[in-house]
Image (cartoon, rainbow, N blue to C red):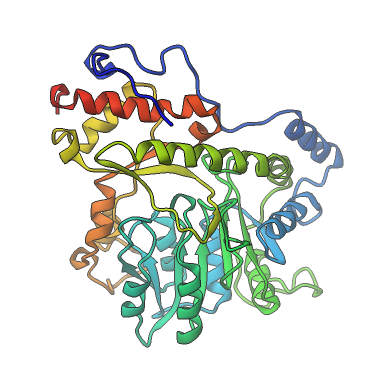
Amino acid sequence: MATFAPVSERPAVLGGTPIRSGKHWPRWPQWDDSERAALIAVLDDGGWWTGSGKVAQQFATDFAHYHSARAGLPFTNGTHTIEAALAACDIGEGDEVLVPAFTFVATATAVIAVNAIPVLVDIEPDSLNIDVDAAATAITDRTRAIIAVHVAGAACDLDRLVELCAQRELHLIEDCAHAHGTFWRGRGAGSFGSFGSFSMQRSKLITAGEGGVLVGDDDALFARVWSYWNCGRVEGEHWYHHASYGSNLRMTEWQGAVLGAQLARFPEQNRIRNERATALNDAIARIPGLRPQARDPRMDTQGNYCWVMHYDSTEFADLPLHAFEAALAAEGIPLDVSYPALHRVAMFHDNAFEPRWRVPRRDYAAVSCPRAEHAASSTVWMEHRVLLANVDDVLDVARACGRIQAHAAEIPQ
């Protein structure tokens, strides 16, 4: 259990000594001689690109198997993975794709990239994931797919989403940018839908600075996505036979080399993060006005891209969220930033889609997703490297929150 600093100890924002003074969090990204040796091996091999190498593809295959999927492709990034998945599912102009209103903008812009229409759906208030009931209500005769985002690695209700998509003959595309190492009832996130999309950008749980992986089991869909990924080529055909439109979305061998080493150490990192997150969840739940992101009991492990908690200012003398976050940062707690609700992002609010969309097709400024808006203004996000520290260090987060609460009325707003 966490122990909190005495009330007499003033928070750092009021001149006290920061609770993390003289202490350091683990760095991110993490690397060692494994990455160095893998990079040198690629250098000496001379292949350097995916077309003549095997390193990136081997990583993608290994990663897919780790996440319970049969096949994987190594991509440039986790935005192109979603775009390619939609294209492989033959989703295009005039089609609608349901997207949660609380996610990174790329989840929706990938839909725009294939000239389809993102339909924003509100979220569950506790998990922050797409509300399956709201999604069911939003389905029309033009709906072709649902993109389910596992926010901060907390799995969506995959049982209900799989059932809903099967009943309505929709593609389920899992946006797993946060969900490396998330398992639901014994299966890896990303293996439940037509495709699972993962990002390997610098902040992610496995990283090569940039990169992505698309996983799945359907051979026909994977043949289509391989073609889109590789300039419209067809496996087994002449190199300059381009059967359909495609792009060049291939990962380099350099990235694959780094990611192979990252994957080797990931299971232990995932175990540590889950253990630390559980301890921090228990400690934070004891502080009035704070509660951790909901964790569905059907989820075996959570990827924990960030550690997230809900904040109720009424239990902190009405201290605004931004002031609470500033006080936490002053204590040495590394914070991330919450997403805004998508319909409040300028691109959507102002229908600024040219040249992709020359005629606005949906009035996003009129969209109402109150739970997404509330989440954007009431959740606190912390960098996942916090969870790689020892348990006592991790509980400094709870101690800092307790100290801030004790003096909240004195903190400038």
Residue 216 coordinates in the image, percent (x, y) = 64, 68
Q: Quadrant of residue 399?
A: top left
Q: Is residue 382 above or below residue 181?
A: above
Compared across the picture, whether 120 is left or right of 239 comes to: left
> Where is the C terminus found, in terms of image quarters?
top left
> Where is the N terminus found, in terms of image quarters?
top left
Compared across the picture, whether 66 is left or right of 26 comes to: right
**Residue 33 makes an appearance in the image:** yes
**Residue drawn 78% across and 37% down?**
38
Q: Quadrant of residue 70?
A: bottom right
As drawn, the residue found furthest toward the right would be 45
Compared across the picture, whether 319 is left or right of 154 comes to: left
Residue 375 coordinates in the image, percent (x, y) = 28, 51
Residue 246 coordinates in the image, percent (x, y) = 61, 69
Q: Quadrant of residue 316?
A: top left
**Residue drawn 52% across and 33% down?**
385
As drawn, the residue found furthest toward the front would be 1
**Residue drawn 81% across and 74% down?**
236
**Residue 207 makes an appearance in the image:** no
The number of discs equals 0
**Residue drawn 35% across and 67% down?**
131
Nearer the observer, 179 or 339: 179
Nearer the observer, 279 or 20: 279
Nearer the observer, 109 or 372: 372
Residue 356 coordinates in the image, percent (x, y) = 39, 67
